[in-house]
Image (spheres, grey):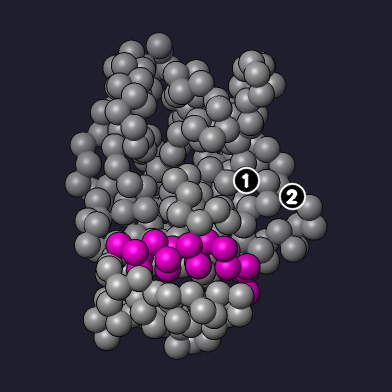
Amino acid sequence: MTQTERRLYLIQELLKEQPEYAGLKIPEDEDGQKRLLRSLVNIRMPRPASPDFLAVQDAYLKEEIRRKGITDIADLQPVQDGVYLWQGDITTLRCDAIVNAANSQMLGCFVPCHGCIDNAIHTFAGIQLRLACAKLMEQQGHEEETGRAKITPAFNLPCRYVLHTVGPVVRRRLTEKDEELLASCYQSCLELAEENDIRSIAFCCISTGEFHFPNEEAAKIAVRTVRDYQKGAKSKIHVIFNVFKEKDLNIYRKLLNSVDFSRGLV
């Protein structure tokens, strides 16, 4: 099957699951089809799918990610020993694990084509990720606490695992509790990574954007927590600070140029 044939097959199968959209016309253009497919995936509740559907979906997603271009950690230059700064799409990064800024339901973003990282990761990992998260949450029996972390396979992403953490939502003004909870997100992910023999982890800018944590303060906490963990635990884990916006790139560049990870100095 070509990518177009795969995309149309997936759209048609997903529409069959949603009787209310039975009369929906499939766009003729590629961009319109991609938006419709992503929207249908985003709103789909966690449930199994047929082997045929998964085979086509997996082939489609792997090819889409390949076309976007995969970046391997081996091709990155560290800014310091074991510490990297990389600007780009985290769903195209090949390392042991990437971090997803999740919500307390831990099921991904249900808003069609939303711009959050949670939406992107679930979209390109495939529908298996939402089902895996749902099983974890069913076992847990309650929503995920802020500052904790869970691990799942990455399915169709180039990385091996996704670590899901719920960052604090800043309301009106930043509090000391917000700062403690954000630090806990990074600490929990690092500890969970070590427990699962993960040697490289990419952190997104947790709690910034939709959760309104000030970018510069969030970056300071991220860098400080990673530095303290690497120093205190004598950890050899490689950490990538992944940014998407130019604003965050400039913040992290400035911070990382002022930090000595080996000596714990700022």
**Magenta part of the protein: which range?**
31-49
Label 1 crowd bin: few (<14), some (14–19), many (20+), radius 10 Å: many
Q: Nearer the viewer, residue 153 or 192?
A: 153
**Dots 1, 2 in contact, CB < 8 A:** no
* x and y, in percent, of residue 238 in the image: 37, 40
* x and y, in percent, of residue 257 in the image: 29, 17
* x and y, in percent, of residue 34 in the image: 35, 65
Image quadrant assignment for residue 168: top right
Label 2 crowd bin: few (<14), some (14–19), many (20+), radius 10 Å: few
In the visual, does 179 lie left or right of 97?
Answer: right
Residue at image position (39%, 61%) is 35
Q: Nearer the viewer, residue 195 or 37?
A: 37
Tell me the distance, in whole angstroms, between the alpha carbons under discs 1 and 2: 9 Å
Amino acid bearing label 1 = Asn
In the visual, does 198 lie left or right of 166?
Answer: left
Q: Residue furthest right?
A: 141
Magenta highlight: main SS: helix
Residue at mark 1: 103
Does 45 lie within the magenta span?
A: yes
Q: Nearer the viewer, residue 54 or 193?
A: 54
Q: Tell me, for residue 143, which label it has, or none.
A: 2
